[in-house]
Image (cartoon, rainbow, N blue to C red):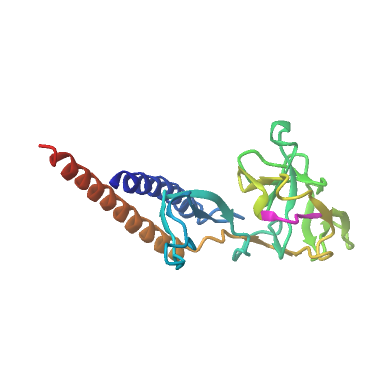
Amino acid sequence: MAILALQSAASGLSALNTALDVTANNLANVNTTGFKGSRVNFQDLLYVERAQPGVENANGDQRPIGLYVGLGVKVSGTQMNFSQGSPIQGNELDLMIQGPGFFRVRVEESLGGEAYTRAGNFVRNRDGDLVLASSDGRRLEPSISIPADATSVQVTSDGRVFFTQSGDTEPQEAGQLQLVVFANPPGLKQIGESLYSATAASGDPVEGTPGTDNRGRILQGFVEGSNVDPTRELIDLIRTQRAFEMNSNTIRAADETLRNVAQLRR
């Protein structure tokens, strides 16, 4: 009866509401450094079997098709898109990963102690250590320190960091950047600040030198912008709105049908 239609349409409204939330978050972070957009994956629910295909009748003929009525839809998960964001020119401490990989930074023990990010908007703290230019100033690991009197900083594509001090003719090496890769990056846990933590689904972090074993290279003077495509997100937003309207109409139609059935007893 129309009760199943009500249930299916209600599940559709709930799932589409989640899709709207994800789209809104993507659009809100269109200018967030290193942000990776997400999409919503849907899956249908169980089906009521009213007739099984292949059943024989009295004449020995088989039923060619079955009769199934679905019970709606649900969100099976949100899938991150780790495609490369556009390069945005910045200052000499801005670093962009060209290809796969993440920077490793130190976070609170409650968050696992370590997190991973594509954001490369680094600055120096009061101790000269490279930290993210974020509200919490996450420290880059392994730690790289640059003296306060350094006049210039150079970072090679394989992650070697050099600085030049006033009066020196030869640069000095400050350290070696390391990048981390995962077997399944979409399995990472999002913890905010464009940071991710490892999970059983992502696999263990594998650290190494940039440019080796499928790791990207470092581009100095640029940061990776958000990979959100506003045009695509607006199209998804319109599609979600239309689907929401259609499911609302289904609920109205089912409600009217049930009202008509109830009036038959009068």
- The quarter holding residue 238 reads bottom left
Question: Residue 45: x, y in percent?
Answer: 48, 49
Residue furthest left as drawn: 266
Where is 124 relative to 92, above or below? above
Task: Look at the image and say whether residue 79 sits in the magenta stretch.
Answer: no
**Is any part of residue 70 visible from this angle?**
yes
Q: Residue at x 9, y 37 (%)?
A: 266
Left or right of 255? Residue 67 is: right
Question: Residue 38: x, y in percent?
Answer: 54, 55
Question: Residue 141: x, y in percent?
Answer: 79, 46
**Is any part of residue 119 visible from this angle?**
no
**Which of the two residues, 177 or 99, is positioned nearer the viewer here?**
99
Residue furthest front as drawn: 59
**Which of the two residues, 55 or 184, is positioned nearer the viewer here?**
55
Where is 107 relative to 218, above or below? above
Left or right of 185? Residue 173 is: right
Residue furthest top as drawn: 110
Which residues are drawn in magenta? 177-185
- Counting every numbered tag in the picture gives 0
Where is 7 relative to 50, above or below? above
Question: Residue 13: x, y in percent?
Answer: 37, 47
